[in-house]
Image (cartoon, rainbow, N blue to C red):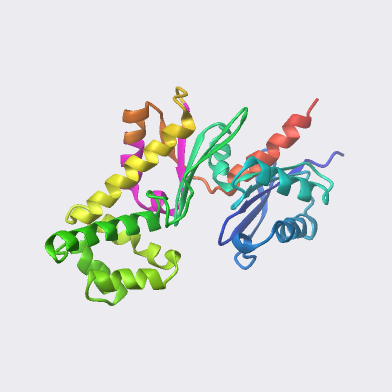
Amino acid sequence: MTTPPVVLGIDAGGTKLHARWSTVEGATLHERILTDVRWGEASFDRRTDIIVDIATNTPGLTANAIGIGAHGCDSDAECHALQARIGSRVAMPVAVVNDAELLGHAIGDPLAVNVVLGTGSIVVRRHRGGTRYRGGWGWLFGDDGSAWGLVRNAVSALARDCDIDGHAEDPLAHALFERAAVGTVRDLVDVMQSRSASEWAAWAPLIFELESRSAAADRAISLAVSRTVELIGLAAEADENTPVVFGGGVVTHQPAYAKRLIAAVGTELGLPGVVLTAEPVHGAVELASSLLALRTP
């Protein structure tokens, strides 16, 4: 009796790794979530070791193909390099893509425009001739639609208010003062400069809560939408009917923000937009399943 094939999908994010063993029909057999692998800081050799250990040292489970969405693989060359290293150590086909690409695979369209809006952000779209990476420059240079981009731009607006009027009488200023335990915008900026961006990115929900009452919050969100749509347009290159799939904690936890982004994508680019409701690891499973489909006579 032939044993049905098993696929392994891995979503290797910056802070956690989610592995799922599944049948090719989509039935989940087993899952592992690891929060201590420090993937974002790991070398390619260490990342290879992590994947190989998961694939070969999980009792009772042997995969026939592995699909991996890897945070930090920000070019085709980096994805291919990691794929080759893992492939040289396991006896099964392997595919590695940037973790953002899992969104498109999860909705069944590998050529979708993938937009991740979490602590940071990036826009990725695979073309038949290669992959386009737009944005993803980090809190200092970009990522306007992300948590740290929203906070940075809102505080920049408050700082400008101080330069113009000598103070910032904005509801958001007082909310951020309370959160950071400070009393002025200058003190707030000092706190942000002394902490990691991931820490103050956690203030982003305040911006959405106060959008209707805060000019600074409204400006930050408007800028986030316009810059994100601009990056989507650069990745899509006017391809008609290309779906745009959004994921990441900011957009999934802020329905009004998601609705505004989808509306802007439709109005300005004429493209359909959707927020991913499945877990991204589902896209990794679909990626792995596609490898077996390619081998079918």
Whether 103 is drawn above or below 34: the answer is: above
**To which quarter of the image does residue 274 belong?**
top left
Q: Position of residue 85 (x, y in %)?
A: 77, 50
Can you see residue 26? no
Q: Residue furthest top?
A: 240
Question: Viewed as shown, does residue 25 lie left or right of 277?
Answer: right
Residue 274 visible in the picture: yes
Q: Quadrant of the C terminus?
A: top right
Q: Position of residue 6 (x, y in %)?
A: 75, 44
| Residue 194 percent across, percent down from the top left | 40, 73
- Residue 173 position, x and y percent, is 22, 65
218 is higher (above) or lower (below) than 129: below
Residue for point 79% across, 51% down: 62
Q: Which residues are magenta?
A: 242-263
Q: Is residue 249 magenta?
A: yes
Residue farthest right in this picture? 1
User: Going 28% across and 58% down the picture, which residue do you hit?
Assistant: 156
